[in-house]
């Protein structure tokens, strides 16, 4: 019998690639979006066999719709969570939907008899707030969400994953829960409604990032992140597992260098200047990317993905390819004029 999987947040960047791969592999897919008025547009972008994909309305902030979306599902990929493109006034604007939404999805999954629940967490829940210097992280590490200066997004992902694991330990019953913890996700973009992570490449390419801060991140391709989700949905014995999904750590300066080297004249607006730390702290008052950067200035975070490779046979493509594919899509879609 064909398995049915619920992918939450079907309008999102990672979820889109995941849904495409699942349908291509023969799964029946349910997906949630906040408003069914977007169904036709999202279907058009996904361009999969429509008979294998059903849409349900559900919001992370409300119980409505989750039971219907979950009915008949054996598996869940809980991907939806807010990724800010603007600064939030109150961290709870991110923490509450991330945490309560995960618990809502878990409760509905248990009630529906779901066997496997894969949650899209983040390296934000693993590797942030350690300060300057070179740090190495594995799945055994956790960000301390009470540490002063953490970006609200980092808090939200840490608190949500912790809450989900605590709930599963106490009340999960037979549900097999595991998390995937990606670093910054890049790769092909399908539409103007792109994820906040892609903004970094956009701002470098269009010249609006006039200088690069002393900030970097692990990078991973959206196609590889989707593939890791599918592997986690299928592999036996995933209960309690946690998988870092990351390629190499690059400073923004190095991303800029790759764009210039690979794109030639199309990268003529990509900056060669460095932004002083004090200026990043001022920018952080207005801009969520700068806020994330300000909390991690001078920090080099190597996030070890060897566990996913050893246990699940996961592989990652070269980081240069992900950066260039992101850039080319942004140019082709007219999002960046070069
Ligand atoms: P995205 O394109 O912004 O997708 C986020 C999804 O969450 C969207 O479908 C969005 O729906 C949904 N969502 C947000 N708030 C919601 C709410 N209150 N109720 C229902 N749905 C809500 O971002 P993404 O990059 O695909 O991220 C997907 C997941 O991966 C998130 O959990 C994120 O934390 C995690 N992640 C992302 C990265 C990255 O670099 N992109 C790295 C690590 C982890 P709308 O379209 O209606 O807003």
Image (cartoon, grey):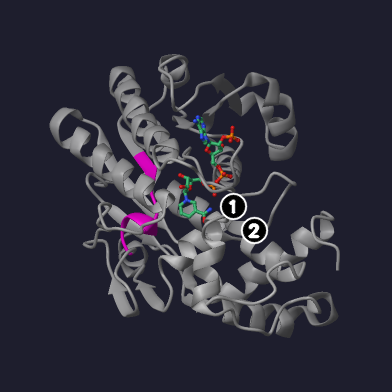
The answer to the question of whether label 1 and label 2 lie on touching residues, with beta carbons closer than 8 A, is yes
CB at disc 1 and ligand 1 closer than 8 Å? yes
Question: Where 243 sits versus 255, above or below?
Answer: above
* Residue 123 on the magenta segment: yes
Quadrant (top left, top right, bottom left, bottom right) of the N terminus: top left
**Place of residue 244 in the rendered image (x, y in percent of width and height, measured from the top left):** 36, 61
| Residue nearer the viewer, 231 or 59 | 59
* Residue 284 on the magenta segment: no
Instruction: Report crowding for label 2: few under 14, some 14 to 19, many 20 or more residues within 10 A (C-alpha).
Output: some
Is residue 326 in view? no
Residue stretch in magenta: 118-127
**Place of residue 203 in the rendered image (x, y in percent of width and height, measured from the top left):** 69, 65
Question: Where 283 sits versus 116, above or below?
Answer: below
**Place of residue 40 in the rendered image (x, y in percent of width and height, measured from the top left):** 73, 25
- The reply, left or right, for residue 332 in relation to residue 15 is right
Q: Which residue is drawn at 26% across and 58% down?
A: 147
Residue that lies at the very extreme toward the left in this rendered image:
170
| Residue nearer the viewer, 48 or 128 | 128
| Residue nearer the viewer, 258 or 144 | 144
Using the image, tell me which numbered label, if any, was put on residue 199: 2
Q: Residue at x 57, y 25 (%)?
A: 34
Task: Determine which residue is flagged by label 1.
Answer: 196
Label 2 SS: helix
């Amino acid at each position: 019998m064909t398995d049915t999987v619920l992918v939450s947040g079907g309008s999102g960047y990672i979820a889109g690639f995941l849904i495409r791969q699942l349908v291509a592999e023969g799964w029946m897919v349910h997906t949630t979006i906040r408003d069914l008025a977007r169904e036709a547009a999202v279907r058009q972008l996904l361009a999969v066999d429509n008979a294998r994909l059903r849409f349900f309305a559900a919001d992370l902030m409300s119980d409505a719709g989750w039971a219907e979306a979950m009915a008949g599902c054996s598996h869940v990929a809980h991907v939806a969570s807010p990724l800010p493109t603007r600064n939030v006034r109150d961290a709870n604007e991110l923490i509450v939907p991330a945490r309560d939404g995960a618990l809502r999805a878990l409760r509905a999954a248990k009630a529906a008899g779901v066997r496997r629940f894969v949650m899209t967490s983040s390296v934000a829940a693993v590797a942030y707030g350690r300060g300057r210097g070179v740090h190495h992280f594995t799945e055994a590490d956790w960000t301390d969400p009470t540490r002063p200066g953490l970006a609200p997004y980092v808090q939200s992902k840490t608190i949500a994953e912790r809450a989900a694991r605590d709930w599963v330990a106490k009340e999960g019953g037979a549900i097999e829960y595991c998390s995937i913890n990606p670093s910054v996700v890049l790769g092909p973009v399908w539409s103007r409604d792109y994820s906040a992570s892609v903004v970094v490449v956009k701002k470098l390419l269009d010249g609006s990032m006039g200088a690069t801060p002393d900030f970097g991140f692990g990078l991973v391709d959206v196609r590889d992140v989707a593939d890791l989700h599918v592997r986690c949905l299928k592999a036996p014995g995933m209960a309690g597992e946690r998988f870092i999904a990351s390629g190499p750590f690059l400073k923004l300066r190095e991303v800029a260098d790759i764009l210039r080297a690979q794109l030639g004249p199309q990268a003529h607006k990509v900056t060669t200047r460095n932004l002083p730390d004090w200026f990043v702290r001022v920018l952080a008052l207005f801009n969520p990317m700068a806020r994330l950067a300000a909390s991690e200035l001078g920090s080099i975070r190597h996030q070890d993905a060897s566990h996913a490779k050893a246990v699940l046979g996961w592989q990652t493509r070269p980081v240069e390819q992900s950066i260039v594919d992101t850039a080319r899509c942004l140019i082709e879609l007219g999002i960046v004029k070069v």
